Image (cartoon, rainbow, N blue to C red):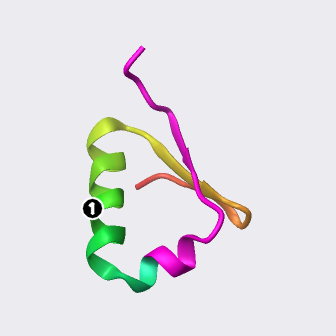
């Protein structure tokens, strides 16, 4: 418990428009080694 391997998002482009929130999400995923995924693909920050 307490581990995340993948963060799924439906409207990542909408989140990316609010730059601060987007960068915080990418930083958290990068530090924890989690992947980001949306309907367009899977990303490794």
Residue bearing the label numbered 1: 24
Q: Quadrant of the N terminus?
A: top left
Q: Is residue 10 magenta?
A: yes
Residue ID at (35%, 59%): 26
Place residue 45 in its image quadrant.
Answer: bottom left
Range of magenta residues: 1-15
Residue lying furthest right: 39
Q: Secondary structure at mark 1?
A: helix
Place residue 38 in its image quadrant.
Answer: bottom right
Is 21 placed left or right of 36 in the picture? left
Is 33 placed left or right of 28 in the picture? right
Q: Nearer the viewer, residue 32 or 22?
A: 22
Residue ID at (55%, 79%): 13
Question: Residue 31, position in %: x, y?
Answer: 26, 43
Q: How many marks?
A: 1
Is 40 placed left or right of 27 in the picture? right
């Amino acid at each position: 418990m307490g581990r995340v391997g993948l963060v799924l998002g439906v409207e990542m482009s909408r989140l990316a428009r609010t730059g601060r929130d987007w960068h915080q999400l990418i930083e958290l995923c990068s530090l924890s080694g989690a992947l980001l995924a949306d309907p367009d693909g899977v990303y490794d920050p």
